[in-house]
Image (cartoon, coloured by chain):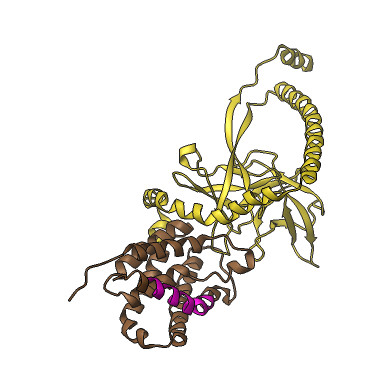
Amino acid sequence: MFADSRFDYLGRVRYYTAIAVTPLHLVADLPSRFATAFGGLFVERRQLAEENSRLREEVLRLQFELQKFDHLSAENQRLNDLLKASAIVDDVAVRAQLIGESPDPFTKRVLLNKGSREGVFVGQPVLDAYGLLGQIVEVQPLTSWVLLITDPQHATPVQVNRNGVRAIATGTPDSLHGLSLENIATSADIVVGDVLVTSGLDQRFPVGYPVGVVAEVLTGNGATFARILVNPTAQIDRSRNVLLLFRGPTTESSPLPEREKALEGLQ
Amino acid sequence: MAAMPRNRWVIVLSLVFAGVLAVLPLPGWLELWRPDWVALVLVYWVIALPQRVGLLIAWLVGFLVDVLKGTLLGLNAGVLTLIAYAALSLYQRMRMFTSLQQSGVLLLFIGTGQLLVFWVLTATGHNTPNNLAFLFPALSSALLWPLVFFCLRYCRRSFHVT
């Protein structure tokens, strides 16, 4: 036990034993998988048609926003080039499915159906469709454990989207559903409704993924630090399909002739 | 006369089944009350067939549980070995007990086990409850013991496991 908590060399033992016990997780997941599969059989045609049209609308709306986004991203790239900023990183997301969670009610860990065979590595960021979910803490051949951001042992460096105030969000030990910001002065400019995104200062999570929305700011009389509670944007307890983030090839910003001109103009 | 081991797959299968139950996803409030299925099944086989299921099996099963749950390697292995040792030294008395008395002993075994797990997790800096909630599994295990006992005895007799 001591060896496992302090050193590394039992990792291999655990790694290979995991192959033997993975089927148990799959079997334990069967009931909920059947429920989703057979739940789909008994849906009315009208309901399906409604959903279909709603999804069509959604696709249209998203495509519209994507066009805008493309434009903005190109503009951003140009501006970064002007500022001689270094490489822009394009992330690649790979879909994975949740097949189990830690039976210990006091930790927030979930099991994914992708492991080292698919190239998953420790420290890899995990997202769902709405925001940051957590990071990989243990990799096995076919599966991997994710530590969710709401676990009290997890800390996420964040910044407020509105004004860039930096903070660290950790899981709250009592509820395990929310986050709280540590050591924020009562005078800091953080109000209810502020969106927190990853700041990327940990060199682990990429910049700018949504983490949570400030739900409550408690400033007691004479308290040095405010107590700030945050609701995670990711569907922590409901997501079944998650995204594993791989760092894509870094695209070096090419020196543009315009930039040289701009710099000359400045001098 | 030592009987030849027969139908040992029943023991293995029941332990595998207990392992599945141990990681079966449960709604939040029920998770606090999840019985220690593996310990229950293990204690049954130790009492029923002490010559087949002993400390080594208990340790191996506990080791697999550790990998299954992603806890510290050796935590459940050690605790299950201790529980098996206690059951092994009391099995002749426990066979004479009524199922209520057996439940009481089980409450003590699994409660002690949970306490040890709680100590180790706290010492290694894991998040642990700050009340007695960690003892709920021991209570639910003791309540379910008669059911587990009769099911496994039925299995043992109908498959003539020795």
Image-quadrant location for residue A244: top right
Q: Residue furthest left?
A: B1
Residue B43 in view: yes
| Residue A55 found in image quarter | top right
Q: What is the x, y in percent for residue B109? A: 43, 78
Magenta residues, as a range? B139-155
Q: Is B82 drawn above or below residue A92 in the view shown? A: below
Chain letter for the yellow part: A
As drawn, A257 above or below A160: above
Chain B's colour?
A: brown
Q: Is residue B141 magenta?
A: yes
Instruction: Locate residue B1, reporting x and y percent.
Output: 17, 76
At x 34%, y 77%, the residue is B47
Residue located at (31% from left, 65% from top): B7
Establish if A135 lies above or below A179. above
Examine the image and state in which quarter residue B43 appears.
bottom left
A74 and A83: which is toward the camera: A74
Residue A173 drawn at (x, y percent): 63, 63
- A72 sits left or right of A1 in the view: right
**Quadrant for the C terminus of chain B in the image:** bottom left
In this rendering, position of residue B78 left or right of residue A92: left
